[in-house]
Image (cartoon, rainbow, N blue to C red):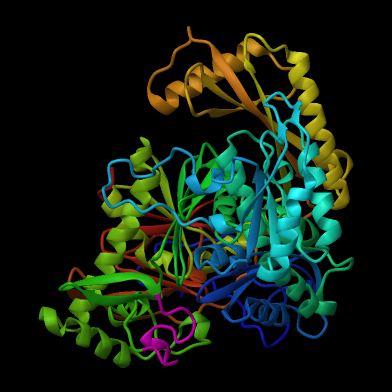
């Protein structure tokens, strides 16, 4: 291992008075650290680019042992932090065998409205289809509801005569000369992309293809996006919105991927295979990401949900609430019966997007979230200090106190040993900033720090309620998996607020999302609108439609070098009762389709979702869906080696407004069978876990750590 890379520390001090008994337990440690007998220079590497830190996880391809490191993010050019982390891992003689990363470039471009300038082409007399935005008013009872701002205003929408009917037949031929107005406007407006969304193109794409060919000859430098390729699914406004979003992001994402590939240069794996996380929880090559940039929209936070799936399989906990608290945001997702909760549609900035996504609820609450005063009250976030200037305690120019400043003042962070000793924090500066904020409220620095923590915890608890209680899910039936650099410090308080009996702190919690990226496979989702009453369509017709999607899936995977028995498919159908508007997606088992069994599965799923069903009613099918999965070759996650633990120590940590002498423990010294009693601080390079009074910690399967409270139900 290159000497410039500090090894991850997962040791806890032996002989601490809070430890009972000892044994051996597996932890992931970085390759090449002291004690390893086998040294290799080939790695699988993942990178998770956050607002404050970029997390790097690396795995030895021979031994399966893995480790993690963090570098400060570089917002002006996110690729620089990735390259710095890779250089630390590879050193002078390391070899990068596989690389995958999650990017928020597309999401940030959408949220900040800094995407590409787009023109929209639709049918004559349907120019307003995107501007009107269907019949979904959003907040139906709100008198202050503001209609979402479209990505393409009406003045940049163009029409063409010609119509395809709902059954796919041609009602009126195209009049391609109508497009000459767009060609002229493109020269004046300098559009970077054109979105083409014509009526019923998902049943017959001939008109969209003809429009593309006509424009491509006249505008060769403008990227063109077709709705039947992006989202071959009914609902005209939603399909148009999805197509416009893809066009809006396409040049931005492609430039970023191209820049990253260029700057990585000879660091790239043999063959140049750079992979990107998808919003559906799979990965794809950079070439595929450039063709379908929309699929990268949520690729940043989705790694944590996939890591939760792997953790569920290892620990046997089927139901998990996964929370990722980093420097800027707080992401919450669910694993139910061992699988991440997913959806076929996302809503971002009030605009619908038709694509398969892992359900993730994101709010602005992280270690860098700024505490500020408004209307006589203290607010926390969503503004973040980020990596530059960062919280006040970083000493990089920040002047407004953040959540990390509050944790430092309360004794929950070690200012001399932050990030494994790579950074030192200024407690006095943080305390002064918090005291200044607390003057108007008659609070000193410690009291204000506790107030900041209480506020951010309340915000995060509400975010968890949004994806559980508001959907009829009882969070008390789940374990809380806390990760991200700041998550483990807040986890016990969140569990108490929501009456959750167990908290799990995974291995490498500060880089768990990046770790999750190494646990997934290549995935591509395909869909097709196939509308019919379930009792009128025959099984062979459905099988034929799925066979067509499977052929597309095999082609996509073959282009990425995956063939044979490494290819698998998952099928599903969208159903609804006759007369209803929305659908439930029902997975199909392998083998021939048994229509009676599928109908019974829909009735059962409907009852689980809504508490009742109507087996006597007719059922309509709307869409068929296929996930094409390509298994990647990767080593097993091996039991890792341990480092020599750092000496035990103690310091005052504030609980319930009072300082208490608290044991400071290095995680690597916890062995199987040990029990750590709170109050305690459990430290490691990527994160710090707070164990309040009355809580205990012990190791479970896979080296993960389970926290429970003595009086928990």
Residue 393 shown in magenta: yes
Percent of width and height locating residue 123:
66, 41
Q: Which residues are magenta?
A: 384-398
Query: Residue 329 lies in what quarter of the image?
Result: bottom left
Residue at screen point 55% across, 59% down: 301
Residue found at x 63% / y 66%: 116
Q: Nearer the viewer, residue 652 or 272?
A: 272
Q: Who is closer to the viewer here, 384 or 92? A: 384
Q: Relative to the observer, which residue lies in front, 340 or 684? A: 340
In the picture, residue 330 is in which quadrant?
A: bottom left
Whether residue 602 appears in magenta in the rendering, the answer is no
Most common secondary structure along the magenta stretch = loop
In this orientation, which residue lies closer to the viewer: 5 or 590? 590
Measured as percent of width and height from the top left, residue 485 is found at 47, 70
Q: Answer whether residue 280 is visible to the viewer in this image.
A: no
Relative image position of residue 692 (x, y in whole percent)? 29, 64
Task: Work out which quarter of the rendered image holds the C terminus and state it.
Answer: top left
- Identify the image quadrant of residue 340: top right
Q: Is 412 left, or right, of 659 in this rendering?
A: right
């Amino acid at each position: 291992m290159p000497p410039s890379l500090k090894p991850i520390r997962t040791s806890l001090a032996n002989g601490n008075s809070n430890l009972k008994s000892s044994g051996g337990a597996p932890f992931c440690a970085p390759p090449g650290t002291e004690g390893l007998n086998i040294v290799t220079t080939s790695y699988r590497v993942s990178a998770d680019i956050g607002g404050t830190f970029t997390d790097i996880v690396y795995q030895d391809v021979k031994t399966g042992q893995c480790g993690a490191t963090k570098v400060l993010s570089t917002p002006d050019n996110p690729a620089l932090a990735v390259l710095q982390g890779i250089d630390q891992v590879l050193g002078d003689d390391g070899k990068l065998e596989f690389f995958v990363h999650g990017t928020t470039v597309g999401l940030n471009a959408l949220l900040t409205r800094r995407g590409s300038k787009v023109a929209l082409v639709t049918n004559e007399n349907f120019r307003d289809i995107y501007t009107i935005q269907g019949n979904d008013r959003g907040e139906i009872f709100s008198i202050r509801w503001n209609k979402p701002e479209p990505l393409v205003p009406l003045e940049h929408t163009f029409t063409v005569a010609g119509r395809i009917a709902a059954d796919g037949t041609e009602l009126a031929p195209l009049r391609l000369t109508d497009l000459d107005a767009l060609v002229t406007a493109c020269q004046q407006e300098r559009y970077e992309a054109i979105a083409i969304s014509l009526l019923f193109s998902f049943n017959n794409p001939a008109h969209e293809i003809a429009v593309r060919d006509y424009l491509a000859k006249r505008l060769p430098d403008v990227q063109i996006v077709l709705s039947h390729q992006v989202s071959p699914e009914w609902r005209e406004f939603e399909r148009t919105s999805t197509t416009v979003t893809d066009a809006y992001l396409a040049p931005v994402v492609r430039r970023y991927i191209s820049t990253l590939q260029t700057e990585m240069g000879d660091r790239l794996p043999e063959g140049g295979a750079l992979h990107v996380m998808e919003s559906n929880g799979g990965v794809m090559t950079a070439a595929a990401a450039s063709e379908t940039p929309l699929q990268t929209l949520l690729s940043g936070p989705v790694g944590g949900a996939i890591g939760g799936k792997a953790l569920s399989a290892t620990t046997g906990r089927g139901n998990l609430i996964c929370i990722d608290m980093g420097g800027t945001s707080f992401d919450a997702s669910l694993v139910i019966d061992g699988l991440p909760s997913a959806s076929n549609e996302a809503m971002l900035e009030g605009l619908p997007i038709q694509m398969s996504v892992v359900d993730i609820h994101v709010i602005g609450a992280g270690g860098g979230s700024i505490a500020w005063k408004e209307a006589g009250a203290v607010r926390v976030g969503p503004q973040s200090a980020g990596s530059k200037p960062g919280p006040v305690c970083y000493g990089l120019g920040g002047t407004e106190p953040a959540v990390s400043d509050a944790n430092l003042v309360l004794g929950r962070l070690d200012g001399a040993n932050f990030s494994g000793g790579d950074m030192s924090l200024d407690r006095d500066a943080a305390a002064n900033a918090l005291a200044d904020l607390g003057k108007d409220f008659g609070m000193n620095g410690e009291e204000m720090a506790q107030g900041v923590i209480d506020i951010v915890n309340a915000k995060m608890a509400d975010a968890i309620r949004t994806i559980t209680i508001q959907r009829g899910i009882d969070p008390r039936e789940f374990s809380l998996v806390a990760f991200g650099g700041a998550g483990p410090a807040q986890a016990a308080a969140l569990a108490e607020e929501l009456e959750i009996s167990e908290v799990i702190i995974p291995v490498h919690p500060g880089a768990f999302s990046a770790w999750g990226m190494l646990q997934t496979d290549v995935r591509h989702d395909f869909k097709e609108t196939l509308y019919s009453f379930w009792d009128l369509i025959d099984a062979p017709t459905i099988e034929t439609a799925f066979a067509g999607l499977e052929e597309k899936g095999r082609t996509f995977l073959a282009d990425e070098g995956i063939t044979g028995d490494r290819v698998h498919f998952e099928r599903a159908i969208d159903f609804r009762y006759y007369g209803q508007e929305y659908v439930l997606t029902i997975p199909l088992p392998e083998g021939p389709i048994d229509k009676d069994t599928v109908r019974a599965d829909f009735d059962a799923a409907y009852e689980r979702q809504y508490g009742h069903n109507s087996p006597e009613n007719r059922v309509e099918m709307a869409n068929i869906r296929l996930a094409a999965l390509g298994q990647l070759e990767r080593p097993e996650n091996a039991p890792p080696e341990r480092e020599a633990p750092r000496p035990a120590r103690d310091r005052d940590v504030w609980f319930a407004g009072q300082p208490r002498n608290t044991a400071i423990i290095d995680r690597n010294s916890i062995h199987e069978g040990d029990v750590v009693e709170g109050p305690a601080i459990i430290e490691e390079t990527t994160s710090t876990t707070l164990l309040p009074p009355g809580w205990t910690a012990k190791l479970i399967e896979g080296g993960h750590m389970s926290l429970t409270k003595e009086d928990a139900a």
